[in-house]
């Protein structure tokens, strides 16, 4: 039980107190809560993978978005899968994605080789999209990552746009409401 509580307490948004309450609830309702949850977790652990094209999480590879024939020929570059899902929830963008897996950070010692930048460049060479949208968060690292990407992507001659107003300073994309995110995406600007 302590092990279970310890594991839950490490999840985002949970601490020891809420972890304890969750574990008690699960143990009290073993048949209807604990066992279905254990089954669902095992199934997810066995079937969910990173898409080999874009980095999204899905039970199929290529993921549903990459495999779809109806998606527009644009690539929206995001830091995390959570950001990708947030943009999908906004229901305004109908193109494809590329998940970097983080941002450049001098402080955290993360360089270009730690992000999925080389696969992005390979993708652009293989099938150039009509537009690249840089959907970075409005953080120092996000700005640095965007700046670096613009330098790398410019030689391809593909129009590059970035999210405009709507993304607050220091704001992570995944916590924004759909309206704010939709405004930011609509008001994106071409990078000169
Ligand atoms: Zn994909």
Image (tube, rainbow, N blue to C red):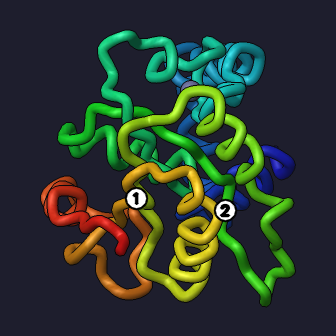
3D distance between C-alphas at marks 2 and 1: 20 Å
Q: Is residue 113 left or right of residue 44?
A: right
Q: Is residue 18 left or right of residue 188?
A: right
Q: Is residue 174 visible?
A: no
Decide which of 45, 30 is in the foreground and name it.
45
Is 115 situated above or below 56?
below
Q: Is residue 3 visible?
A: yes
Is 169 situated above or below 11?
below
Decide which of 178, 68 is in the foreground and name it.
68
- Residue under the image location 53 percent in, 24 percent down: 33
Where residue 18 sits, quadrant-wise, is bottom right
Q: Secondary structure at mark 2?
A: loop
State yes or no: discs 2 and 1 in contact (Cβ < 8 Å): no
Decide which of 42, 7 is in the foreground and name it.
42
Q: Earlier in the sequence, mark 2 or mark 1?
A: 2
- Residue under the image location 61 percent in, 43 percent down: 24
Q: Which mark is residue 160?
A: 1
Q: Which mark is residue 20?
A: none
Q: Which mark is residue 102?
A: 2
Query: How far across and how far down the image is residue 86, in percent?
Result: 36, 48
Query: How far across and how far down the image is residue 34, in percent?
Result: 61, 25
Q: Residues within 10 Å of mark 2 (few under 14, many from 20)?
A: some
């Amino acid at each position: 039980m302590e092990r279970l509580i310890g594991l839950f307490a490490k999840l985002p948004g949970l601490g020891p107190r809420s972890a304890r309450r969750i574990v008690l609830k699960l143990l009290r309702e073993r048949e209807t809560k604990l066992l279905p949850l254990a089954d669902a977790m095992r199934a997810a652990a066995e079937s969910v993978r990173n898409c080999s094209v874009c980095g999204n999480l899905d039970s199929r590879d290529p993921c549903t978005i990459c495999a779809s024939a109806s998606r527009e020929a644009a690539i929206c570059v995001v830091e995390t899968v959570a950001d990708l899902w947030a943009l999908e929830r906004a229901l305004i963008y109908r193109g494809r994605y590329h998940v970097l897996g983080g941002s450049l950070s001098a402080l955290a010692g993360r360089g270009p080789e730690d992000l999925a930048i080389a696969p992005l460049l390979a993708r652009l060479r293989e099938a150039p999209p009509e537009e690249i949208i840089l959907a970075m968060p409005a953080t120092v690292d996000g700005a640095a990552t965007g700046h670096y990407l613009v330098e790398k992507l410019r030689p391809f001659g593909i129009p590059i746009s970035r999210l405009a107003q709507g993304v607050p300073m220091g704001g992570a994309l995944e916590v924004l409401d759909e309206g704010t995110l939709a405004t930011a995406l609509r008001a994106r600007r071409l990078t000169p």
